Image: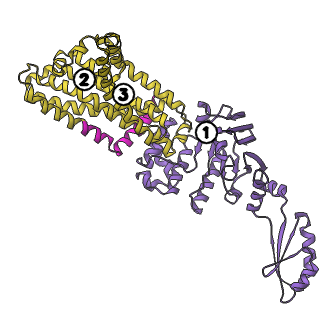
Amino acid sequence: MTSTLTISALTKTFDGAKALSDVSLHVAAGERVALLGHNGAGKSTLMKIILGLIAADAGSVSVCGAAPGSAQARAAVAYLPENAAFHPALTGLEQISHYLRLRGESAGKAMEFLDRVGLGHAAKRRIGTYSKGMRQRVGLAQTLIGAPKLLVLDEPTSGLDPVSRRDFYSLLDGLAADGAAILLSSHALTEVEARTDRLLILSGGRMVAQGTLADLRREAALPVVMNLTARNGYTSDLMAALPAAIQFAEGLRISCRQQDKLATLAQIAVLESKIADIDVMPPSLEDIYSHFSRRDGQ
Amino acid sequence: MIDRILATAITEAHIARRNRWVAIAVALMVVFSLVLAAAGSAATGALGADRLSVTVASLTSLSVYLVPLVALLMSFDAVAGEVERGTLPLLLTYPVARWELLLGKLVAHLAILALAILAGYGAAALAAIVTDPRAVAGLAALWRLTWTSVLLGATFLCVGYALSSLARRPSGAAGLAIGVWLGLVVLYDLGLLAAIVADNGGVFSTRVFLFALLANPADAFRLFNLAASDATAAAAGVGGAAASIPLWQSLASMLAWPVAALVLAAAAFRRVVP
């Protein structure tokens, strides 16, 4: 697959503070990539450099084979800013018509785009009367104009309810299937888990992890946690039999490495008669995300 | 290119209509023009000039204050407002050049201003012609006043865009706009007057003064309209200064200013980092 977006060794400094250091990444056509990081990790700065809104200090960026911000790149890239804002006096229809005209398309198609994001019913109302989620959808509608080759979406699902969020991701699936490269940012791994092909984690301006969720899970090698509930009176017996366990609320908790999981379970199975229940908990998405985003910087 | 400029112009026209700028500008110009037409008619009987020519002289003095004010009020928010609302970054990722955005705004705002000017002057002309059939003789002067007012408006719209880009906040831009209006339209002339009095016929009065008049778009506008029409000059009582400057010089100043202001605005807008 050809790379739609290629970034290498990108560095950006604001007033002496490093916003991005030595960041490299690529996004291929048809690929959905999630960019994760805390507030201030450098996500928005990275996106603004990709869009050509601000210049990098060092490193190179290629957007569809052109320089970021060049006419060729801008014609191929769509952007959804964080907290998309529009003039409150315009109606949704007028705003989308405006964006269509700027991309050289017929303004007559505006209604079609609003319908695609479920805003057809509010098309003739002023954006000033819209809710945050509705404004976000106006923002989303304008990213669909002109079949962009690269979509840069800054926290696209913030302000959307769970149903709209699912609709949003199915919209993205369709775009990716048509060959668009998608780079979207988010605070939370749980929001993007199943709907993206690859994850990038930025922390303190550095790229601390890249890969599929399975890759990251393996690389993080976080312990598996098991919670045991003892039958009445057997707590101390279990404690004696399982020296690694710690007493926790109503029961016991054991942490073990991924590769020791089966051996530990075998050890527990022997004690079956003394155990009322067991829960095995793999590391959560939040645990994995925290593992990477705290390793550096914080 | 034309499509993108028109796209911006259409959207700006929608916004101006919703924000009542069209209604406000037209109402202001019509009311003030009619008041002047009515007030001017009282004293003309003995002067010998037709009623419209006298009204044009009054309108010239009015427009030199009102047109720049309305233009600055319409334009001060153009860039700073986009920055504050957070709409600028998205707009700048579209395949549209910054100067195209400015030109689109200018087309819309200038069309509204021209509409207001036409409505105001038209109302005054109608009032003059209805009461004095000789007034048709003044139509040429009124037409000259109309297109020069549009040029003056274009200059101050572009000055407004430049201030809006420099200030980056609407409140700051509004303050700058009022300051520039006061400075160029009101205080500038007072300053020149003070300088002439102090200079007492020296180098300033003989050489610098006329150049200083031409350098100010509002003064160039006044000079051109007064010099072009003897009747209005006589009525306005400032024929002296107007007569000593050739017509082409004030015309050149008026034509050069909108272009210079647009270049200035584009340069200032280019420096805005979203």
Residue underneath mark 3: B154
How far from the left and from the top, in percent, is residue B195?
Answer: 32, 19
Task: Pick whichever, B169 or B197, lies toward us.
Answer: B197
Task: For marks 3 and 2, give the CA distance.
Answer: 14 Å
Q: Is residue B26 magenta?
A: yes
Q: Is residue B59 magenta?
A: no
Pointer 1 chain: A
**Chain identifier, purple in the render:** A
Q: Is disc 3 placed on a helix, strand or loop?
A: helix
How far from the left and from the top, in percent, is residue B108?
Answer: 38, 34
Q: Is residue A242 left or right of residue B66?
A: right
Residue underneath mark 2: B145
Task: For marks 2 and 1, give the CA distance.
Answer: 47 Å
Q: Are marks 2 and 1 on the same chain?
A: no
Say few, some or many: other residues with alpha carbon within 10 Å of mark 1 (under 14 / 14 to 19 / 20 or more): many
Quarter-of-image position of residue B246: top left
How far from the left and from the top, in percent, is residue B69?
Answer: 32, 34
Q: Is residue A266 left or right of residue B128?
A: right
In the image, the segment drawn in magenta is B1-28
Q: Colour of chain B?
A: yellow
Q: Is disc 1 placed on a helix, strand or loop?
A: strand
Pointer 2 chain: B
